[in-house]
Image: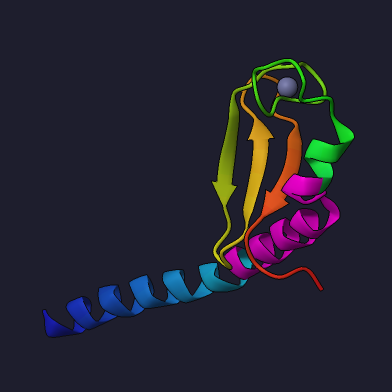
Amino acid sequence: MLVYIVMIVGLVFIGLALRVPFAMRKDYLAKKHWKSLPTADEYMAAIATGNGRGICCIKCGSNQIWEQHLISGQRIHYCRQCKTDLYGTGGERK
Ligand SMILES: [Zn+2]
């Protein structure tokens, strides 16, 4: 009985361990993408914000800007309507 418990626990740990490189790779790619996005200041300078609705999507004009949090602390702000990634905040850009 104990052997089975040890085997199941072992398989769970192996399963979790196998996911780590994939999660790291996903975050690495997201961070790389984050670096390619403009900062909030650059984005606001690039779009006309004089419509009284504050910051809005450069593509569809929606003001529903949501954010995706990365493991490393950065945030990618995207348009909820057309799913376009707009700008990145948080963390250091190097
Ligand atoms: Zn949009």
In this picture, is 40 found above or below 94?
A: above
Question: Main SS type for the magenta part?
Answer: helix
Q: Kindly indicate the quadrant of the structure image that contains residue 77.
A: top right
Residue stretch in magenta? 23-41
**Is residue 30 toward the left or the right of residue 11 in the image?**
right
**Is residue 94 toward the left or the right of residue 75 in the image?**
right
**Is residue 85 toward the left or the right of residue 73 in the image?**
right
Quarter in which the C terminus is drawn: bottom right
- The picture quadrant for ligand 1 comes to top right
What's the coloring here? rainbow
The single residue placed furthest to the right in the displayed view is 46
Determine the residue positioned at 71% across, 70% down: 92
Q: How many labels does the image show?
A: 0
Using the image as rendered, state which of residue 63 and residue 59 is in the foreground: 63
Residue 56 image position (x, y, % from top left): 70, 25
Determine the residue positioned at 81% across, 40% down: 43
Determine the residue positioned at 72% across, 62% down: 31
Using the image as rendered, state which of residue 94 and residue 33 is in the foreground: 94
Residue 83 image position (x, y, % from top left): 69, 28
Residue 71 image position (x, y, % from top left): 54, 64
Quarter in which the N terminus is drawn: bottom left
**Magenta span contains residue 29:** yes
In this picture, is 41 found above or below 20?
A: above
Q: Kindly indicate the quadrant of the structure image that contains residue 10.
A: bottom left
Using the image as rendered, state which of residue 9 and residue 55 is in the foreground: 55
**Magenta span contains residue 33:** yes
Determine the residue positioned at 48% across, 76% down: 17
Residue 65 image position (x, y, % from top left): 61, 30
In this picture, is 18 found above or below 89?
A: below
**Is residue 71 toward the left or the right of residue 16 in the image?**
right
